[in-house]
Image: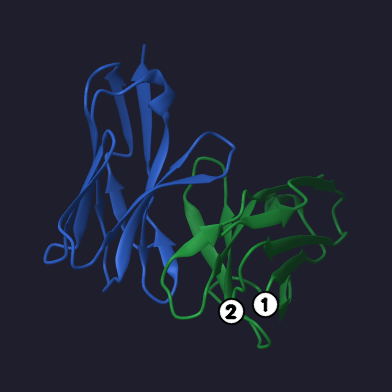
Chain colours: A blue, B green
Amino acid sequence: SQQGEEDPQALSIQEGENATMNCSYKTSINNLQWYRQNSGRGLVHLILIRSNEREKHSGRLRVTLDTSKKSSSLLITASRAADTASYFCATALNDMRFGAGTRLTVKP
Amino acid sequence: GAVVSQHPSWVICKSGTSVKIECRSLDFQATTMFWYRQFPKQSLMLMATSNEGSKATYEQGVEKDKFLINHASLTLSTLTVTSAHPEDSSFYICSARLAGVYEQYFGPGTRLTVT
């Protein structure tokens, strides 16, 4: 079964704008990870945030984690057309469960 | 480091036949491997967890007699889709994990098409 929900399910923005995706989960976690997947391709690991961390940055990516609310957000700043993809959060404890994903479209 | 490969990357088979997908950890020993299935425009769904040398644990709703998983060594797990049907057409992704750590490393996926 999936771990939780992501919203929005789909997001369309213009190049240069910021994109924010949210993820909620249901159980305890050791860490939460965000992945990108281009259509029909494999997963690309973006960032991992541990349960004792609240915020993490990597380049244009900013991830927050609120374990009290069981939620996380991924912010992509200054988006580019190449950021067009599906984005999934995944929670890890004994195994890894994926959220439903957000399909991001960045228009040039 | 921590590279996981899958073979084949894509396969087409006829209904009723069986197809085997391999998942290998290339530079580490994976005590646990996971198999996921992803239908078009959907998320990854965990199918089963396999520990080296023991039987796989299947998620609810996944037929263990249809999806045979073998984790015979610390670097290789195989998923065999038996008596394949068109509805088994999907993207199958494996991942591998070292003992004692939570990080998983994902393979590139195998696209199965059953005609």
The residue at the point 72 percent across, 70 percent down is B76
- Return the residue found at the far top: A108
Q: Amino acid at mark 1?
A: Leu
Q: Residue at point 39% right, 28% down?
A: A83
- On screen, B110 above or below B40? below
Please, which chain is the residue tagged with disc 2 on?
B
Q: Is residue B114 visible?
A: no
Q: Is residue A32 visible?
A: yes
Give the image location of residue A43, x and y in percent.
51, 46
Q: Position of residue A80 (x, y in %)?
A: 35, 21
Residue B18 versus residue B115: which sits nearer the camera?
B18
Residue contact between numbered discs 1 and 2, judged by CB atoms under 8 Å: yes
- For label 1, the SS is loop
**Residue at label 1?**
B74
Q: Which mark is residue B31?
A: 2
- Using the image, determine if residue B33 lies above or below residue B106: below
Q: Is residue A107 left or right of residue A67?
A: right
Amino acid type of the residue tagged 2 in the rendering: Thr
Residue at 42% from the left image edge and 38% from the top image edge: A86
Where residue B36 sits, quadrant-wise, is bottom right
Cα separation between marks 1 and 2: 6 Å
Find residue A78 and report its image quarter.
Answer: top left
Extreme residue toward the bottom, this view: B54
Q: Secondary structure at mark 2?
A: loop
Asked whether A78 or A88 is in front, the reply is A78
Residue B35 picture quarter: bottom right
Q: Position of residue B27 (x, y in %)?
A: 64, 63
Crowd band around label 2 with a 10 angstrom C-alpha radius: few (<14), some (14–19), many (20+): some
